[in-house]
Image (tube, rainbow, N blue to C red):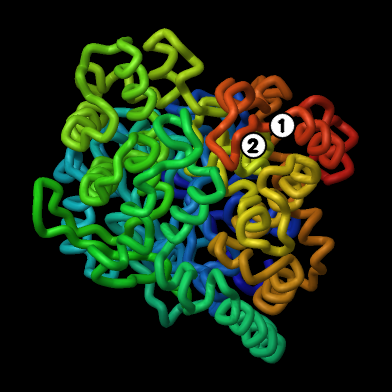
Amino acid sequence: MPFGGYANRVAWIDLSSGSVDYRPIDEADARHYIGGRGLGVKYLFDNGPDVDPVGPDNLLCLMTGPLTGTEVSMSGRLAAVTKSPLTGTCADSHVGGWTGARLKWAGLDGLAIRGRADNPTYLLVENGNVSLKDAAGIWGRGVHDTVRTMRAAHGDEASVLSIGPAGENLVLYANLVNEDDRAAGRNGTGCVAGSKNLKCVVIVGDQSARFRAEDRERWREVHGTVLKLITDNGVTGPREGGLSVYGTNVLMNIVNEAGGLPAHNAKETMFDGAEDISGEAIKEHILIDDPTCYACAVACKKKVEITEGPFQVLMESYEYESAWAFGANVGSNDRAAGAFLMDLCNDLGLDTIEHGNVLSVYLEATERGMTANGVTWGDGHGMVELTKLVAARDGIGDTLAGGATATANSLGDPNLAMSVKGMAIPAYDPRGIQGMGIGYATSNRGACHLRAYTPASELLGIPVKTDPLAAEGKGELTAIFQDLHAVGDSFNICKFSSFAEGMEEYAAQYSAITGIEVTADELAVTGERIYNLERHYNNLNGFGGEDDSLPRRFLTEPGTAPADQVCDLDLMKAEYYAKRGWDNGVVPEAKLRELQIVS
């Protein structure tokens, strides 16, 4: 394949037989699906939708994109694509750090893993090859210990993508965790790895093998323009109030003031203790460093240390979603307890967002007298003990290990779960941020803010300011964001790039790196194709318009002022389907042909 940016080599690994087959990327697939998320979804679709998510036939793809490991800013990400054991949908999850770049430098665009090893196994990737190694000595260990052990064996610069006990025990929302603290979260990627007896992937790659742009002269011009956009931007630039200063948790006060912060399992849309767990408070009280991912000038990670009290911890980044999950969502303004729970989840390999929702469901049930456990709102010690039980699938933890939806069902009230398609919401309430309502409902992987980040427009004014309390226009806005993010995820560059860049900048960088001349309009169609392929995969698994819904609470119970209203989903859903050209949530044959998904 005569394109820049690609190693043109994907390792197809069968853990059942121990075989590894190296294949080039089909040129048509590269043009239609790019790489990363898009190419991973194409491989997942070709593998067939009718597979058991925790069976040996399910495919787990770890994919880079053509911009990964290049000189492109924020290009260090890796996509994990699989069929989700939590939702039964097509799922992709992305992780930062250096692992994606090192996989490309090691000579591979991705790993496509199927089968199930007879015994605990890990994969070693170096010099363009993959070898299967015995993982019996690290099975049962936490993520932190696994990373230390693997780096002792393979070098301090090795990247380690691993599961913890939660993945080994097939907790449905277990994560793959990268380099101690960066998680390929949501959807149960770690559960899929655990079902395959795959403990970790160790990648050794030398930065001297970094990919260079195919068109050097054009790249220099494009890169200068894009870098200026990033540094001059109020969100991504190094100025007060942005990601560089406060990290992702800069959003805590902003979202709370807008009435869009779900509190006490979304019974309210504001939280009195938000200031105590905000990015500003973290910077003032416990911040010690600002680590960053490969090729990133933003440095949104905020390393924290707590040296006193019962929740002492040293952790790489105090993230917004996790701060909410173990803060407002569970009625706690104890930032130390929150940090401890975040680090514990990282070590055990649990998705913090889903787990925070599991806890809030259980806490509300306790408040209603539906459980006798005694763990109440804000009880840090009680939540720590519940977390350990979940990872071990011990006692009540075995029930909670199914996620928020399964927990609510087991307790006798499905409406306790703030979930869509079986996956729980992140830190945005759709009564106060209406675009999140249609975003959650139509997300192909369940309730997710990263399919279409409408708060960029509704709260931050990017690319234009829209009213967060207004529903009109949000269906169309969501579809546009979904297609934009599908492209960025297939390049495998950070979502935060979209605060400063648009499809024009994406097209210019992709053209310079790969030598494939593409316009912004053509890329938009590619994003639409990827999103529709995912939806088609879900349709084949029985998902339709009835699944594009929201928890009853958001549709019937007004939020806290200023968001003293419900989410107007019906209006947005009609607008969205019209924009997509879907028939009640199903991609029609004509649309599949138009987008060249089928011939």
Where, quadrant-wise, is the C terminus in this rendering?
A: top right
Disc 1, SS:
loop
Disc 2, SS:
helix
Distance Cα–Cα, label 1 vs label 2: 8 Å
Q: Which residue is mark 2?
A: 437
The front one of 183 and 500 is 500
Q: Which mark is residue 356?
A: none
Determine which quarter of the picture holds residue 281: bottom left
Q: Amino acid at mark 2?
A: Gly
10 Å crowding of disc 1: few (<14), some (14-19), many (20+): many
In the rendered view, would you say 154 is above or below 32?
Answer: below
Residue 564 left/right relative to 584: left
Q: Which mark is residue 568?
A: 1
The percent position of residue 242, horizontal first and vertical second, equals: 49, 70
In the rendered view, would you say 550 is above or below 493?
Answer: above
In the rendered view, would you say 321 is above or below 425?
Answer: below
The percent position of residue 67, horizontal first and vertical second, equals: 59, 69
Outermost residue on the top side: it is 412
Q: Which residue appears at 63% of the width and 71% of the height?
A: 500
The front one of 391 and 315 is 315
**Callout 1–callout 2 Cβ contact below 8 Å:** yes
The percent position of residue 587, horizontal first and vertical second, equals: 80, 32
The percent position of residue 88, horizontal first and vertical second, equals: 54, 26
